Amino acid sequence: MKYYPWVIAGYLCLVAPAQAWNNFGHMEAAAVAWDKLTPAAKKKATRLLKLNPQYKTWIKGVPVGQRDQIAFVKAATWPDQIKSLKNYQNDGARNGDVAPNTPEASQNIGYKDHFRHKYWHFIDEPFSTDGTRLIQPAPPNAQAQIAKFRKALADADESDGIRSYELSWLLHLVGDLHQPLHATSRFNGDEPKGDAGGNTVKISCALSCNGADELHAFWDNLLGKTDAPPQEAIEAARNLSPVDNEQASRMDESDWIRESFELAKSQVYISPPVGNGDGPFALTGSYQEDSLATAKKQIALAGARLGNLLNDALK
């Protein structure tokens, strides 16, 4: 695909650093998925994840009988872990958040790839509150990579090393797409280049902001502390409300994006308290409580769909 200079320039302005759910949220989604895996899928996932370079650190000090589950939920945090590992590097513009126009941006070569690929974590579908011109998201992005990885993971002829890499990314990216602010960017007269999924929107909180001072991070941190041990996320996953089976069976990643996009407009950008512009906006207690309820529903749904995806790919 050819990228015209004005498209690249616009997209450079669109994105900003984004984390999606913090470690707790990703582990919680993976814990939901683990409980839904068939014995065959658990066995294959465990075998593949042992090839991840961080596997030994995940199971250090963990009792033998718990290692498979703990490694699985920790693997869901790996694509964020590599953002701070010295042997990985950013690729692309704006500290690696904008994909370079090179084949390496969408490569699938397994753990030989030491790029961080930060732009794989989101797809900022735009909307405007006042008719401001929209800038469309450019590939590669979360949608493109999930489609690629899930197809390749199911290919028994693919090498285990590459399938391990794909599994590690899928454990994370499925969760990413269920965070509403990883599927949208808001445009208006105050934000003509977009707010990068709420990253530019400053906030304060009636209750605790959990260390966040902008809207995106507030949503990232809703579910728990990022440095919590895996067992806390596993316990939290067991206390989530059951997911509607019909919803969980929707396995097209484009549907997940549309759902998150609509949630962002209806549940995140609610005025009041979140008005136009970059704030700061004071989040009310009721907004925070409603946001937590939405986050719990989304993480349960992400986990259920992840379980279905892996049961299909790892037959």
Image (cartoon, grey):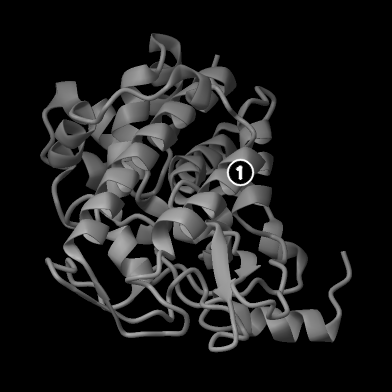
* Residue displayed at 53% across by 63% down: 114
Residue 41 sits in quarter: top left
Q: Which residue is drawn at 24% across and 31% down?
A: 240
> Residue at label 1?
146
Numbered-mark total: 1
Above or below, 287 against 45 in this view is: below
Residue toward you, 140 or 79: 140
Mark 1 lies on a secondary structure that is: helix
Query: Which of 142 and 203 lies nearest the eye of the viewer?
Result: 203
Residue 55 visible, this orientation: no
Work out whether 33 lies above or below 136.
above
Left or right: where does residue 142 sit relative to residue 131?
A: left
Please give the name of the residue rendered at 59% of the width and 73% of the height, measured from the top-left corner.
129
Image: 166 above or below 96: above
The location of residue 23, given as percent across then percent down, is: 28, 53
Quadrant placement of the C terminus: top right
x and y, in percent, of residue 67 in the image? 22, 29
- Residue 284 relative to residue 101: left or right: left
Q: Please give the name of the residue rendered at 56% of the width and 69% of the height, measured from the top-left corner.
A: 185
- Relative to the observer, which residue lies in front, 79 or 6? 6
**Amino acid type, label 1:** Ile
Q: Can residue 234 be seen in this view?
A: yes
